[in-house]
Image (cartoon, rainbow, N blue to C red):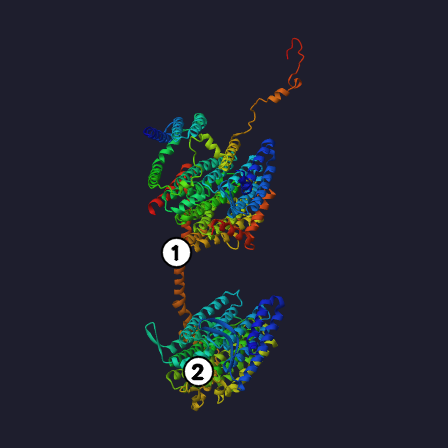
Amino acid sequence: MYSAIVFLPLLGAAIAGLFGRLIGDRASQWVTTGLLLISAVLACVGFARVVLGGAPFDVEVMRWIVSGTFEVSWALRFDALSAVMCVVVTVVSGMVHAYSWGYMSHDKSIARFFSYLSLFTFFMLMLVTSNNFVQMFFGWEGVGLASYLLIGFWYDRPSANAAAIKAFLVNRVGDFGFALGILGTFMVFNAVAFDTVFAGVPGVAGKTVHFLGLSVEVMTLLCLLLFVGAMGKSAQLGLHTWLPDAMEGPTPVSALIHAATMVTAGVFMVCRLSPMFEYSQTALTVVTVVGALTAFFAATVGLVQNDIKRVIAYSTCSQLGYMFFAAGVSAYSAAMFHLTTHAFFKALLFLGAGSVIHAMSGEQDMRKMGGIWRKIPVTYTFMWIGSLALAGVPFFAGYFSKDLIIEAAFASKTGVGQFAFWMGTIAAALTAFYSWRLLFMTFHGESRADHDVLHHVHESPVSMTAPMALLAVGAVFSGVALAGLFTGEASSAFWGKAIYVAANHTALKDAHHVALWLKVLPIAVAFAGILAAWYMYIRKPNLPAAMAAEFSDVHSFLYNKWYFDELYDVLFVRPAKWLGRVLWQGGDGRIIDGFGPNGLAALTLDVARRAARLQSGYLYHYAFAMLIGVALFVSYYLFVR
Amino acid sequence: MTSWVPAEFTAALPEIFVALAAMALLLIGAFRGDSQTRTSGWFAVAVLIVAGGLVAGTAASPGSAFGGMFVADAFARFTKILVLTGTALAVILSISYIEREDMARFEYPVLFLFATVGMMMMISANDLIALYVGLELQSLALYVAAAFRRDSLRSSEAGLKYFVLGALASGMLLYGASLVYGFAGTTSFAGIAKSLGANPGNIGALVGLVFIMAGLAFKISAVPFHMWTPDVYEGAPTSVTAFFAVAPKVAALSLFVRVLVGPFGSIVAQWQQIIVAIAILSMVLGAFAAIKQTNIKRLMAYSSIGNVGYMLVGLAAGTEAGVRGMLIYLAIYLAMTVGTFACILAMRVHGRAVEGLDDLKGLGRNRPALALVLAVFMFSMAGIPPLAGFFGKYFVFLAAVQAGMFALAVIGVLASVVAAFYYLRIVKIMYFDEPADAFDRLPGREVGVVMTVTGLFIALFLIIPGPMLHAAAVAAKSLFPG
Amino acid sequence: MILQALAFYLFAAVTIASGVMVIAARNPVHSVLFLILAFFNAAGLFVLMGAEFLAFILVIVYVGAVAVLFLFVVMMLDINFVELRQGFLQYLPVGALVGVILLVEMVFVIGAWVVSPEATGLLAAKAPALAQATNAEALGRILYTKYVYLFQASGLVLLVAMIAAIVLTLRARPGVRRQNIADQVARSRDASVEVKDVPVGKGV
């Protein structure tokens, strides 16, 4: 059964991918979606088993690599962490599959799309169920590949190709760190299985290694390297630039990969490796700072974006920041909790945005929307639910997880914890603001769309709204339903050994006992944000433009995403291009080609010309050649030997 | 006195048969005139086939004849069959060609048969005088064959050059033979081996060997005794060139092996260096000089020089495995070369034979079948697996590596990379260049048959290499007693 | 004994000198004449060795036939000797160098000459004493028995040479009239004679 959860999507992907042309689009849809839904049901069953107190276990599929002391078996681990992730992944993926029936109905290559989606799901499940680093890396690279394929799904668009390549390359940086981390882990522990490594961690803690003349703690080095991988995959500050561009892919892809599942792989990894991170205070500090900064940075950028999907993308980025700083203050279960709730409401928001885009005939710019809430009431409702959950309005899913994170940050009582707390609080206000800005700009006010477009606005078909409804249920109730299990009194029994928290890291426990103002503060700032949005976009619609003009420097700074892309262009892209050109023209062209192939070829031709010239046609030349040859050979024997 | 006569006859039966048949053919021709050339051509082919049967049948028991001057062993059997096959194929290719080119005279097949007798005598030679006589019989017939189209200046020039240089080479060989005789007191190979075995470091015998090797190297066109090859290949009528490129090479190389491994077997270390030197020179020159050629016959001349270099690599190893590799290479080389020349014979535009590489342009479109066959031969010559040419090279290089001659093997491989350039260029010209004038229909059905048979042999060698490898192993073993 | 040695050195010296002159002489006719001289001296050397049969064969065949044929050919062909000499002079230094090197090497070789101890035992056909058989008889005894293979093979070589000469030179020239006796004999009166009635005073 557990193998089936993982391998059914692969089966679907193979059928749709290899025989899609043969069996047709409709059959491909049925096969992939059907298999995925079965997988989702199985995952829920598995989850229930964990909830009921089943012990974690491994399912070994096969021996994978055996080389000397290096042994990797291909096994599926089912414990609380992977059970949660399996449910999240398969349920969201199933909803996205179903949603795509309607959304992609006009596309040319439906079978290919569904095959990619299922393939992605397989790799993601591979990642979350792995019981060793190598298999995790396999899944890690697999989701990267699937992400590349799906971002560039419309490969006839140059911008989609560029975005796909960008996503792939930026992830390369992270993956390089991840790979180094795995290699380092193997060097230190001589094993790649999680159990073996985790068992060895306490023995290594505190030891240092000399690296580039620096003395570094072993665990800190390993954790930081691994965290670089997490940063790349989860689009944290510095390696986040690919995520907004990834919105070039079809919207269901954005919902599945770039909101609910793949981008959370980094968070999952940190949680999975909590037995390692717990032994490096430095690494935890870095995780906290990076997470907090990302949460704040992405929220500010989200304020001024005009593309509906980009706003949500930055929102995702920001929420991932929350999860990271939760993990950074050792509130791993809070991070996992937010991951789960976020998966529901962010997928819902994306699917809702997709529904809007679908209704607006492909328009994504919010400046060309507005006043359509009456025409697509269902979508409108779902977007409200999603936004309420995102903003952390009480009793929606986000409220439970996000507030807990903010409180945990405060309760950690460390300097970086306080920093994260304030960043998180400000980001919460900003989150509320940009969410309602999105709602107001899209659905309210005067319509700024073309007449034609407006005329065609229509509610999405049931195949799209039904999955959204399911996700909306999740967005409303998952918080209240899972809060006790994930972070309450029973949580330690639930997570078992999957998450390890050092005894002196008590942030999460203390979070439940913070002062009242701390509990109210996030709610208050959220409402403040909503009110501000209402004031600026409904009450005084001219104000935003005026403010943008007044504070044009700030606005363009935010609008241009803090100039990260430009900075990278100057720092990395251009030097890399220059280096590439130098190596290509100078190194490859002049030196390698010059002395290598071309030079040798020229030399060969030269020698050939001389050799051909030997053949003069004169008899006495030939006779001379023979005589000289004999004379040389005889001389050789007489004198040399 | 009478007791040895039957034995002589059985051992030398194929030679006697071919010689008598050649004389019979000469008489028939003298009485019937040139009109029957086609018939006598096929008659010659039949004679060669029967002789092949006799070789295969009679030489089962190795024996020597004529007081030890003539030896028939497994090695002789293998190479004789190669010679007879090569000659037969060359005669088949010639039949239509000589009619078209207006040189159909009955002496043509007769000369080929006499050359074959000479070659078989060379292969079976077990005495320096027998060696020389066989060599002269072969050479004389070849000189005439090269100049056979006596109205053509180029053909006459080719024959004359070949004759003069051949005479020089024969002179060297005789000089060397006399030096060896002076040392050993005998011309018999067994006797020489005995003398050298007792007194290996003798400089006189060694210098004599150098001269003998020079004479033989001339016959196989190894550098630096190769200079005649391009001119003669180009000047001689194409069907004669096809003959030159295969049968005499086989015979001379076999003789080379027999002389070096037999009487001079005890001083391997001495002659090995010369063989290594001429092998390297041949491979390198064959590879480089061919690049600038524009005439396909000239190109094939350099190609044969290079191939001889590869075969000498096997000999240079000085081991049984090396000789075996060389014999395999010889057989494959024979098939490739005959096939390629069959393709060259098919190069006729508007009833006129052409020889330029440029004439091959666009052959892939005009004559796809012909282009495919030629491409197979070129890929095989370039040594690209799974074609037979690869295995030839593989076995000789393997033998060299096993004998510890790594440098030689590496140079050989590098040379074959350079050589691959011009072989593949032909493929490129055929398939990727703008078409030139289309070729005429095949000059005769037999040309197509030869092309197909050799092409199939090259392409399918991989599937059943067993019999060939086994025969070559047996042949090589018979040279290395014990 | 002294006389024999003197004769040997005389013959040998003249042979070598005339050999040099064959290639050094400016006039090819002189070259051929020097060649004949060389043959004669070689024949003398044979006589000294007691091989009088070979000596006479050399004189009769080579001098009497081959060299004379050479002479005819050289006289009849129109060869531009000046042009030939040019090439000779141009390559003289290289040629001389190679020649000298080879010569020196041969001297070395012959200086270090050793006849294998086994050689005497290996001699294939010892020459019988003169008292027992004449030259021709001794040759004949082995030529048709022990060396029959080589004898026949040489015969083939000569046959091929003959074919070669015919192939390369014999051609049916149109317009050349040859006497055909059979035709002449078989000719009938009707085919060759026509009787015409010539009217008086008019002519044919």
Q: Which chain contains the residue that carries disc 2?
A: A
Q: What's the residue type where badge 2 is placed?
A: Ala
Give the crowd class for mark 2: few <14, some 14-19, many >=20 residues within 10 Å.
many
Q: Which chain contains the residue that carries disc 1?
A: A
Task: Judge depth for marks 1 and 2 and give the one in front.
Answer: 1
Q: What's the residue type where badge 1 is placed?
A: Arg
> A490 or A257: nearer the eye?
A490
Residue B403 coordinates in the image, percent (x, y): 43, 54
Locate residue A224: give its quadrant: bottom left
Q: Earlier in the sequence, mark 1 or mark 2?
A: 2
Locate residue A637: give its quadrant: top left
Q: Which residue is mark 2?
A: A326
Residue B190 coordinates in the image, percent (x, y): 45, 44
> A485 or B324: nearer the eye?
B324
Label 2, secondary structure: give it.
helix
Locate residue A578: give its quadrant: bottom left
> A172 or B163: nearer the eye?
B163
Disc number placed over residue A590 in the picture, else none:
1
> A153 or B390: nearer the eye?
B390
Residue A258 shows up from this direction = no
| Residue at the extreme front | C132
Q: How far is the residue under mark 1 from the one under mark 2?
A: 53 Å
Q: Is residue A227 left or right of residue B441?
A: left
Q: Is residue C44 above or below residue B404?
A: above
Q: Is residue A632 above or below residue C157?
A: below
Disc number placed over residue A238 in the picture, else none:
none
Give the crowd class for mark 1: few <14, some 14-19, many >=20 residues within 10 Å.
some
Residue A290 coordinates in the image, percent (x, y): 41, 78
Q: Is residue B95 above or below residue A421?
A: above
